[in-house]
Amino acid sequence: MRTVVILFGIPVIQLLLFGYVVTNEIKDAKIAIYDQSKDVVTRVLTQKILSSGYFKLEKDISNYDEITESFKGGKTKLVIVFEPNFARQIEKSGVAHMQIISDASEPNTANILTNYSIAITRDYLKELSPITKSPIQIIPETRMYYNPDLKGVFMFVPGIMALLLMLISAMMTSISITREKELGTMEVLLVSPLKPIQIIIGKVMPYALLSFVNACVIIFIGHFVFEVPVEGSLILLLAESILYIITALSLGILISSVTNSQQVAMLLSLIALMLPSILLSGFIFPIENMPVILQWVCQVMPPKWFIIIIKNIMLKGVGLSYVWKETLVLFMMIVVFILISIKKFNIRLE
């Protein structure tokens, strides 16, 4: 029965995941508007942009300083700025200017959203030209915050870091502990003077150190080889990496508590960690594009929260005040994973 489930169930799940997740379309991306003119033309153009289905207004801003704060908050993906006297400039010279500013920490999303907004502006110009009966132009000036050259490596370094740390910490921990069960040495260890917590710490500590070294190597190579900046605190970045490693280790302990063989632990780790870490973490595909049910699944994926944290620290230079929610989520996951593992462990002892 298990073989049948693996042979038929896993391909179906993978097909559904790829079918719903792998898409270049973006819907309801949150944007901010800085309208310095507030005239008929800017209001109509704003309505055109918001009614397209691609964008959703997060907030109206009143000065340039709020643009950076909006991006650091993490929700705003795009800011559109209309120059003062927008309609009057069109009437007077036939030319008006607007700025399209994108959060390019996700370069693919930034590029797509910028192209969407430019295309909508051009369509509006076609509607406006017959009315004005004279050639007019709305010239968009595009700016990419945090990644001006739209380098893909700015996206891949945080994603690869999250993926590798999760696989090394969780998978190797689960396999290591289940190996002791298979060999029968776990029972020997449990009847020794050592406490269970000491046994577990002794098993996971090498992988914790290995994962931390890997995190440092990835940050070093990313910064000095691929020129990925570390704008924020390096100490905070390393501390968040340690927190994520502990989260992955606790997940590995949980997997080992519900499995009795290395093969099952490895299979469960790969299915539950590797594929979801790639597809459901926001690493490659925007979470906002996914069906609601998959968006809820994404909320329980530790890599999703870690990627948000390290992108904000490395690219945006934010402090703990901007990523405390994500940090708290990872901490709560550690608590939940450990509590469930203890419960499963006690049941097995009984």
Image: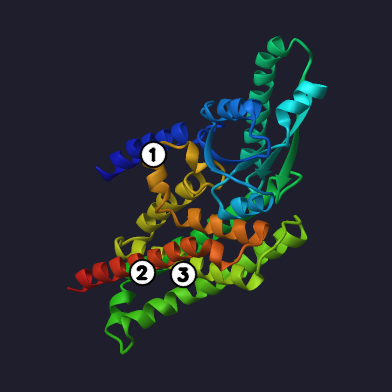
144 on left or right of 252 = right
Q: Which residue is mark 1?
A: 292
Q: Amino acid at mark 1?
A: Val
Closest to the camera, between mark 2 and mark 1, is: 1
Q: Amino acid at mark 3?
A: Ile
CA neighbours of label 1 inside 10 A, class few (<14), some (14 to 19), many (20+): few
Discs 1, 3 touching: Cβ within 8 Å = no
Closest to the camera, between mark 1 and mark 3, is: 1
99 on left or right of 21 = right
Instruction: State the residue at coordinates (70%, 59%).
Output: 222
Closest to the camera, between mark 2 and mark 3, is: 2
CA neighbours of label 2 inside 10 A, class few (<14), some (14 to 19), many (20+): some
Discs 2, 3 touching: Cβ within 8 Å = no
Q: Which residue is mark 3?
A: 246
**Residue 310's spot in the image, x, y percent?**
59, 60
Front-most of 13 and 53? 53
Q: Is residue 168 above or below residue 37?
A: below
- Identify the colour scheme used: rainbow
Considering only order in the chain, which callout, 3 or 1, is on the residue closer to the N terminus? 3
**Residue 137's spot in the image, x, y percent?**
77, 22
Q: Which residue is mark 2?
A: 335
- For label 2, the SS is helix
- For label 1, the SS is helix
